Amino acid sequence: MSVESPSTAPRLAPPRPHHPRRQPSRTPPYGFWRRLLPVLAAVALAIRLPSFLHPFWSPDEGYLAVQARILANGGELYETVVDRKPPLLPWLYEAAYTLLGDGSVQAMKLLAVAAQFGTAALLAAFARRRWGDRAGATAGVLFLLISVGFIPQDTQALTFEVVILPFTAAAVLFADRGRWGAAGVAVAGAFLTKQTGGVVLVPVLWLLWRTCGPGPAVRPALLRTAAGFAVPVAAAALLTDPAGFLFWTVTGSGTYAFSLTGSELHVLIRAFVNTLILCLCCVGVVPPVTRALRTTPRPAGTPLTDLWVWFAASAGAVTVGFHFYGHYFLQLLPPITLLATATLRSLRRERLRSVLSVPAWVCALFVVWAVFAPRSELVHAERVATAVREHSAPTDRVLVWGMHPQTYRLADRAPASRYLTAGLLTNFSGGRDGPQVGEAYGVPGAWRVFAEEMRARPPALIVDDSRGKPYGPERLPTLRRLLAGQYEPLPGTVEGTVLYVRSSGS
């Protein structure tokens, strides 16, 4: 009987230790939020400090400020003053103006800080729920760093898109938690801020179907979501004018939303440039995210399909209307932030800090740019406003024919028309210089109402601020006849802007 030597005996491999799947690290909620929220608040304030340097950064801010004064003095939305937007943000402006008067401008800048902070906190809550504490902190900070990555007029202004973001983040967070009624209310808040905000309903419904499936639970969840959305929207319609609400927010803007003829090249260039800027503000996270998507296996139980659905829906919202303004792209940032967080969470702590340092430096550059960027259009509006004050009395109503409604607020004069910009009457929008600009392309019925306003209460002063744009009076028969029959130009111009006063015989 032979005995195998130890050197020739077969060796059994030692048993492989069992490593259970590591769960996301989470500290008690109080400790996590006590540390993170002050950081998010400080960063949100820091990135928006330049916004306090100027009263208005964009025509949208000017429009809202003038609306607020009209509404606070007894005006009616969609009647005394009109806009293509839903009523939520005008109401917020009205409340601020009623409480604070002229101090409302600074108060609304604080609202923008709060909206950025709220969005960051909601994204942090979503990421923490799925991937743990570190992912939550990453998502909150990363969103704030990339949220100023466009030209200052798009990121420092209180735009409709800035106010949309916390509603969209809340809608997806509530849906992820199965709180369908609250998710519907959040979708309604986004829609009542700007129509395109309603696209967040797509990822909400995706999460509803993924959670409830085709079983009996889907119907009550769907009903709660629908009720949460419908009740606030119906209340807003009833608080304004249902017919006016429907017309100005849905049915009356077809030409504006879908006309592109003659402006294709300009629009495509703007889309390309703003896409490049978006890539620039995300430049630090693009390489590691790309590498992680290519090399890291997808963790079990943490699908990202809902985030890609959210991103695709937001991309559709950016595309609708074919305008591609920089502030439209802000709607992409929440899903981009969460997708990046999902892939960056596998990095070691030191590597993650190194990755985030790049968007931090890029963010700092954009903030510095906002501080020192020239404000030629604001300076022009201030000079025109000075001329308006010199040639009109405080009680006079004036008509500023242009795309800068902040002139009314800077001049402290009431507008003579419910249409605060020439765009509503001509279909002009920044950069749209094609053939679909003129009386025939304005909001249906607007020129009839405008003519009645001019007959009933002719403005003491008309300011032609078209400066060679395609909505100039020479291309608009109704306005041209009004100026020729009742007004005469003052000598000289204000950087190309012509002021008309009523002629002695009118």
Image: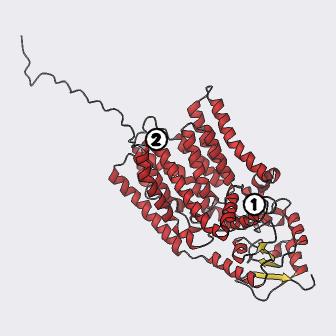
> According to the image, label 2 marks what residue?
130
Q: Is residue 407 above or below residue 494?
A: above
Residue at 88% x, 75% y: name it: 482
Residue 331 placed where, x, y %? 59, 54
- Out of 391 and 462, give the one closest to the viewer: 391
- Out of 421 and 106, give the one closest to the viewer: 106
Q: Is residue 255 above or below residue 152?
A: above
| First along the sequence among labels 2 and 1 | 1
Furthest residue to the right? 505
Furthest residue to the front? 99
- Out of 482 and 471, give the one closest to the viewer: 482
Q: How many marks?
A: 2
Residue 422 relative to residue 326: left or right:
right
> According to the image, label 1 marks what residue?
83
**Is residue 336 visible to the viewer in this orientation of the structure?**
yes
Residue 140 placed where, x, y %? 47, 53
The answer for how far apart the CA atoms under marks 2 and 1 are is 40 Å
Residue at 44% x, 48% y: name it: 136
Furthest residue to the bottom? 491
Q: Amino acid at mark 1?
A: Asp
Q: Which mark is residue 289?
A: none
Q: Amino acid at mark 2?
A: Arg
Residue 315 placed where, x, y %? 60, 51
Q: Secondary structure at mark 2?
A: helix
Furthest residue to the top? 1
Residue 165 relative to residue 65: left or right:
left
Q: Residues within 10 Å of mark 1 (few under 14, many from 20)?
A: many
Quarter of the image where one finds residue 180: top right
Residue 76 placed where, x, y %? 79, 60
Residue at 63% x, 25% y: name it: 216
